[in-house]
Image (tube, helix red, strand yellow):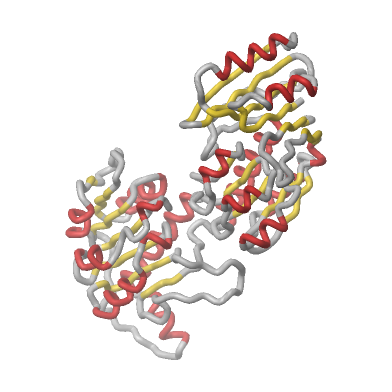
């Protein structure tokens, strides 16, 4: 599908050029070891794909992103307003993970850059890791394995427990928390949960009205919250003090959520019997980089390098899913499941030409767009409009390619953020 793109985001020289792209001209940059299936999918659609192993800092990313239309990242590459200002060709960003707090979503939306993620693809992998770590901590398997590697035979049952009959407290009852709830019950755990949103309890799980209520009864506390700013410092010294003596703590969600210095103190005092942490406030950008944490060297503390979703199955699913979303947006204007754009999907029709217009959400925009098309004799054959907050998005299918003069007039409408013609 050919793409004629009129981009009203200003380049550094102040111009707003119209560029002609076909699929073979679309440049894709994939960072952070994104699964090869994602790259192969996009190459199979004719896109030019470059892959890099590690994350990039702001300056390196600005250099690498020049002329790039589609960008794929994971959790350690940060998309700032400065990066976006330096990337006028960028159409969409794919976060090949669940979280998008590493992306300035307000800035992407203002520039008409669509953002996609994979909210469900690695749920099972994270849940399985949580279950494995709960059992490992309760049985002190990590400690025993370390002793064995050191040549120490310690067959004592002291401090080792079954998880059956214990109470699991889940903080955050979204896709991961709720699936964990079901599997934990099947293993004989009682489940309580706390969420700021009104969530339906699954199975025999019981909702707690406050975090304090959950901490008072849970033998194991596990966090499954998102990266919104309000979750920074969610679990600190006060919350740890309220946990039951000799309970366990897991954080497989966001590094900013837990005060690791406080956690070290509570583990050293013996109040918390063990912890498993997969995410950290500061994480290395590349494989093999040095890792520092307050939690290093503690007994019965499992530290993993942000691998909750790092299974072959999950990464393959994520690679295909997000890549397909990027392709759909670039070639057809589809925004289904976009994080920041109104969701629209018109069926692809190779006999039609499509206008994809991102605009500020203001009264009368659609009438002005259609009036302008009508003045130039452009016949609309299908159209879909959706809004989300301050932004709107409209896909319009027309029978014939729209001329440059009409595109320029649409681009000059005061509400227009970004305009592309897909044909």
Quarter of the picture containing the N terminus is top right
Residue 87: where, in percent of width, then height? 68, 48
**Does 46 appear above or below 214?**
above
Tell me where residue 412 sits by quadrant.
top right
Tell me where residue 214 sits by quadrant.
bottom left
Q: Is residue 178 left or right of residue 344?
A: left
Q: Residue furthest front?
A: 14
The residue lying toward the viewer, choosing from 139 and 284, is 284
The residue lying toward the viewer, choosing from 408 and 265, is 408
Quarter of the picture containing the C terminus is top right
Q: Is residue 48 left or right of residue 33?
A: right
Residue 274: where, in percent of width, then height? 32, 72
Q: Is residue 41 visible?
A: no
Q: Residue at x 52, y 38 (%)?
A: 340
Residue 120: where, in percent of width, then height? 49, 44
Residue 317: where, in percent of width, then height? 59, 47
Q: Residue at x 29, y 77 (%)?
A: 265
Q: Residue at x 55, y 69 (%)?
A: 284
Tell me where residue 207 sits by quadrant.
top left
The residue lying toward the viewer, choosing from 164 and 318, is 318
Q: Residue furthest bottom?
A: 151
Q: Residue at x 65, y 61 (%)?
A: 59
**Does 6 appear above or below 323?**
above
Q: How many marks?
A: 0
Q: Is residue 17 visible?
A: yes
**Does 143 appear above or below 53?**
below
């Amino acid at each position: 599908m050919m793409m004629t793109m009129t981009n009203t985001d200003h380049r550094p020289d102040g111009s707003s050029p119209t560029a002609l792209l076909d699929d073979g001209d679309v440049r894709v940059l994939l960072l952070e070891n994104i699964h090869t299936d994602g790259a192969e999918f996009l190459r199979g659609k004719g896109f030019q794909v470059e892959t890099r192993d590690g994350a990039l800092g702001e300056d390196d990313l600005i250099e690498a992103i020049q002329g790039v239309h589609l960008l794929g990242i994971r959790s350690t590459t940060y998309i700032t307003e400065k990066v976006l200002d330096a990337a006028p060709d960028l159409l969409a960003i794919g976060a090949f993970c669940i979280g998008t707090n590493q992306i300035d979503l307000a800035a992407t939306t203002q520039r008409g850059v669509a953002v996609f993620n994979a909210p469900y693809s690695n749920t099972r992998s994270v849940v399985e890791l949580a279950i494995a770590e709960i059992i490992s901590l309760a049985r002190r398997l990590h400690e025993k394995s370390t002793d064995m590697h050191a040549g120490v035979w310690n067959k004592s049952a002291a401090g080792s427990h079954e998880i059956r009959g214990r109470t699991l407290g889940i903080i955050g009852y979204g896709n991961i928390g709720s699936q964990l709830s079901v599997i934990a019950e099947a293993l004989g755990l009682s489940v309580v949960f706390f969420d700021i949103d009104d969530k339906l309890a699954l199975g025999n799980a019981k909702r707690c009205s406050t975090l304090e209520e959950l901490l008072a009864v849970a033998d194991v506390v596990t966090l499954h919250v998102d990266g919104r700013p309000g979750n920074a410092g969610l679990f600190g010294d006060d919350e740890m003090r309220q946990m039951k003596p000799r309970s366990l703590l897991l954080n497989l969600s966001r590094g900013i959520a837990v005060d690791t210095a406080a956690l070290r103190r509570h583990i050293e005092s013996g109040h918390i019997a063990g912890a498993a942490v997969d995410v950290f406030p500061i994480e290395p950008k590349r494989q093999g980089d040095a890792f520092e944490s307050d939690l290093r060297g503690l007994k019965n503390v499992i530290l993993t390098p942000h691998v909750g979703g790092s299974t072959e199955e999950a990464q393959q699913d994520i690679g295909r899913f997000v890549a397909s979303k990027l392709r759909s947006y670039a070639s057809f204007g589809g925004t289904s499941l976009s994080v920041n754009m109104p969701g629209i999907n018109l069926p692809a029709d190779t006999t039609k030409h499509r206008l994809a217009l991102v605009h500020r959400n203001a009264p009368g925009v659609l009438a002005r767009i259609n009036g302008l098309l009508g003045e130039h004799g452009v016949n609309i054959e299908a159209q879909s409009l959706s809004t989300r907050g301050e932004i709107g998005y409209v896909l319009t299918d027309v029978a014939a390619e729209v001329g440059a003069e009409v595109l320029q007039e649409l681009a000059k409408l005061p509400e227009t953020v970004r305009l592309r013609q897909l044909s």
